[in-house]
Amino acid sequence: MNTVYLAGPISGLNYQGATDWRDYAREVLAANGIKGLSPMRGKSALAGLDKLGHKPEDCGHLAHLTPLATQRGVMTRDRFDATRCDVLLVNFLGATAVSMGTVMEIAWADNCRIPIVCAMELGNVHEHIMLCEAIGYRVDTLESALDIVVSILG
């Protein structure tokens, strides 16, 4: 089964904000026989947090909830997923700050020559010549990005 890694900002969001679009994408992909890999899988213990962080001090105390949410846990699994998927789907829509983690995932996938499909509006905070060059397909809606993913893997 083909797999798609669902990359996008998490820091600053609550659990629902980080999972809603990913749950939707996983449903659309599953209907087309494609598996969506969310970086939030196995992290339901974080649902009670008001805001998810990205600094070491934001993650260190989460080890008792799940080792997947620690600094090392996030890095290890996200790199594994971003380098083994068939397509990397990035959702930058509405981002208010640069997501360094997602930028790293794009770099890992690009290094492995994995196709990158990105939903990002004009003027997004992620506008950067190198990032835009690494993205193979850029559209302005999540639905359009999912259509491209299905077309690539269909």
Image: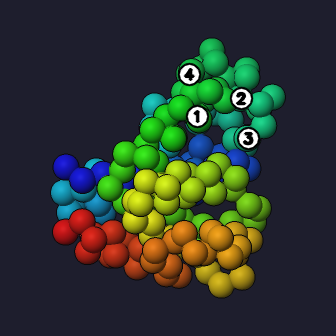
Where disc 4 sits, the SS reads loop
Q: Gap between marks 2 and 1, in whole Å?
A: 9 Å
Name the kind of residue labelled 1 in the image.
Val
**Label 2 with label 1: CB-CB less than 8 Å:** yes
Crowding at mark 1 (Cα within 10 Å: few <14, some 14-19, many 20+): some
Q: Are the residues at dot 4 and dot 3 in contact (C-beta closer than 8 Å)?
A: no
Q: Which residue is mark 4?
A: 66
Residue that numbered label 1 is attached to: 74
Q: Earlier in the sequence, mark 2 or mark 1?
A: 2
Left or right, 5 with respect to 149, comes to right
Q: Are marks 1 and 3 in contact (CB under 8 Å)?
A: no
Residue 145: percent from the left, percent from the top? 42, 74
Residue at 52 percent across and 51 percent down: it is: 108
Callout 2 amino acid: Cys
The residue to which callout 3 is attached is 53
Q: Is residue 46 left or right of residue 124?
A: left
Of the two numbered discs 4 and 1 on the same chain, state the one appearing first in sequence: 4
Foreground disc of the pair 2, 1: 1
For residue 17, above or below residue 145: above
Numbered circle sitting on residue 59? 2
In front: label 1 or label 3: 1
Q: Tell me if residue 101 comes above or below residue 88 in the rendering.
A: above
Mark 1 or mark 3, earlier in chain: 3
